[in-house]
Amino acid sequence: MSSPKIIYTITDEAPALATRSLLPVIERFTRSSGIRVETRDISLAGRILASFPDALTESQRTGDALAELGALATTPEANIIKLPNISASIPQLQATIAELQQAGLAVPDYPTDPQTSEDEAIRERYDKIKGSAVNPVLREGNSDRRAPRAVKQFAQKFPHSMGDWSSTSQTHVATMGDNDFRSNEKSITAETDTTLRIQHTSVEGTVSILKEVQVASGEIVDATFMSVRHLRAFLDEQLEDSKKRGILFSLHLKATMMKVSDPIIFGHCVRAYFSDVFAEHDQTLNQLGVNVNNGLGDLLEAIQELPTPGRQAIEDSIKRAYEQGPALAMVDSDKGITNLHVPSDVIVDASMPAMIRSSGQMWNSHGEQQDTKAVIPDSSYAGIYQAVIDDCIEHGAYDPTTMGSVPNVGLMAQKAEEYGSHDKTFEVSADGLIKVLDQDNNVLIQHEVERGDIWRMCSVKDAAVKDWVKLAVARGNATGATVVFWLDANRSHDSQLITKVNDYLGEHDTDRLTIEILSPIEATRLSLDRIRRGEDTISVTGNVLRDYNTDLFPILEVGTSAKMLSIVPLMNGGGLFETGAGGSAPKHVQQFEAENHLRWDSLGEFLALAVSFEHLGQSTQNRSAEILGTALDSATSRLLDEGKSPSRKVKELDNRGSHFYIAMWWAQAMAEQTQDRELAQLFEPLANELAAAQDTILQDLLDCQGQPMDIGGYYYPDPALAASSMRPSATFNNIISQFG
């Protein structure tokens, strides 16, 4: 029998840097229990290389780690630690390609304007890498995400800052409410296994097959579209209203995950704000190949090619637009980076709770906080944020020392719902009809559309829904908390889900549970009321709301979503353990490059690893693995209690110092446990050595800080440089390398 195995993923940015420091500790500690820790590279750079083996030499080629892990996730023995990865926008994709090429890896350029069939084929390969390309492959189960007890207790004991709310705050959410994805949604449940055909018929009668999709019996299928004509009118109205009210204009989308629809919406907003710029210089900008879907930053970069007079004329037009339009929310006030510069800079699920936590305000160009119009065009879930804003205006900010918790059970298995829609999302090429037909040519869904409209179809499999309901009941029974399904009976998709939920709840013993089915807005209000009373409420949601809620409530409760425990019980018995929803933290890397200080908090890694050990121990009857997990939990609690998480400031404890403390206290907990005497004796010398060398190691980890750090690349760092930079203490390295 092979030894039990944990797969640890190599991803991007700050988490990838942290792995260089933490993984050697994990590998040495697990040897004592006969556990192998292997890595798989699913970084953006790694996925590009895996997609273009034909462009590389044999020695440069790498296997398709994501496909391998996707297959593993369907097996009972799966045990995967998943760190945050980049959901790539086009600018991020292009930057990564440039780094790979500079390193001598001859991957092709991204064809922004494909001219040949070869260009189209290359672009198709790259498009599969964009956006949320990783998670749908790995998530062969539904999501159980919650704040661990130690994290919640720490937040109560040492509450994070919460900005005061004014009862006269003008901050609000602006959303379309009609002619959008929510209002145009139509949904059916497939009665048999079938092949669906998505077909566009122009007003002239030209028929185009957009996609053929296999669906299974019981699968819920929905289709909808956003009217771009109404979107533009809506954006113009909101820009005018922001100017009139004297508040910031801020656009909140998910251009990374919703990689087809949301960049298009983003581009329309850029064009709306800078309408005079495009009216005056449209011919020049078209000649330069400016793609507004990539934001104002793409335009500003493109015009650098122009002679000074031409560039200056466009820059003057942009300046006038700023002067005449509403003030824009800023990503970086010092650098002049606005909310409209880059589509991946402002992500709704992180940006909205951050705004709510900061008195309902965002930063203006002067580096000051200001009331804000938060523009979320699609109304599907915009109302939840307005409900929170209304609650804060009426009752003030939340109190982390007393507030209840809102854990989440999220429907995401087998590419459930909206995040599985990328290959079934289209920008309509001509006025006409889009129909969804079955293999017998029956029309199941149809929409009248106009050129430029954004049409999409998504689905959720019956088995995924059944497992989701089962998990919700299990979490309710485990905690005794009220369980709320966030489903709107007036929304077509949700009404189909409600039927299934009611059916599958009947298969479980729910007599001791309080279970409700409420619309997202009603569910938000109920949860907020219970939060203020210190009561916990399990939110049971679809895929997008899973993403939103697992940032919204944790950021309010514990200050960050990166400290959440994120477990995916895979449907075939394995486990996927995600390290929190903290993103890949680009600003952390920028600080690291500037002053060799990494403020990334690996708490999510510690938490995920502990439950991974627990799962491994139970599934393989490996008692040592369970002991390792319990000891790591003990060390993590001590790390929080003694305030040894990374500081934001250079020349203070950073990520590497946090790793030293977790190693020392983990070793001490292993030495002090009484369940396995042999293990205790093995770890005791290590614990003593680390304690004795503490002062030297910590000084090493401080002395290295304060100067620029070159690791040979941002998206594709040099492995040796990255490793040495993250392991600067020879004393610590030697102690760890000699153990086990």
Image (tube, grey):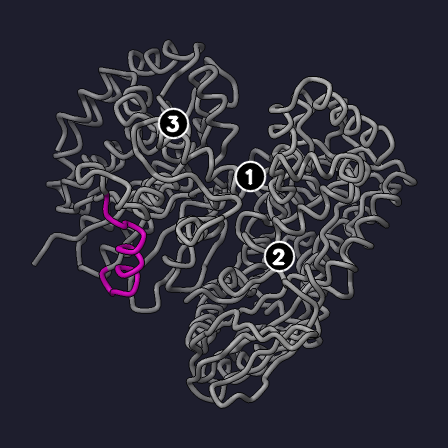
The reply, left or right, for residue 184 in relation to residue 422 is right
Q: Which amino acid, by three-letter code, is at mark 3?
A: Ser
Does 552 appear in magenta? no
Magenta-tinted stretch: 62-77
First in sequence, mark 2 or 3: give its number.
2
Q: Which amino acid, by three-letter code, is at mark 1?
A: Ala
Give percent across and percent down for residue 424: 52, 65
Q: Nearer the viewer, mark 1 or mark 3?
A: 3
The reply, left or right, for residue 253 in relation to residue 258 is right
First in sequence, mark 2 or 1: give its number.
1
Give percent across and percent down for residue 375: 75, 48
**Residue 332 quadrant:** top right
Residue under the image location 48 percent in, 81 percent down: 504
Marks 2 and 1 sit apart, C-alpha to C-alpha, by: 16 Å
Q: Residue 80 carries which label?
A: none
Give percent across and percent down for residue 206: 61, 74
The reply, left or right, for residue 653 in relation to residue 517 is left
First in sequence, mark 1 or 3: give its number.
1
Q: Residue 535 carries which label?
A: 2
| The N terminus: image quadrant | bottom left
Secondary structure under badge 1? Answer: helix
Q: Nearer the viewer, residue 419 or 546?
A: 419
Residue under the image location 59 percent in, 66 percent down: 456
Give percent across and percent down for residue 519: 68, 69
Q: Residue 155 carries which label?
A: 1
Residue under the image location 33 percent in, 31 percent down: 662
**Residue 186 quadrant:** bottom right
Query: Which residue matches tag 3?
Result: 658
Does the rendering let one see residue 426? yes
Q: Which amino acid, by three-letter code, is at mark 2?
A: Glu
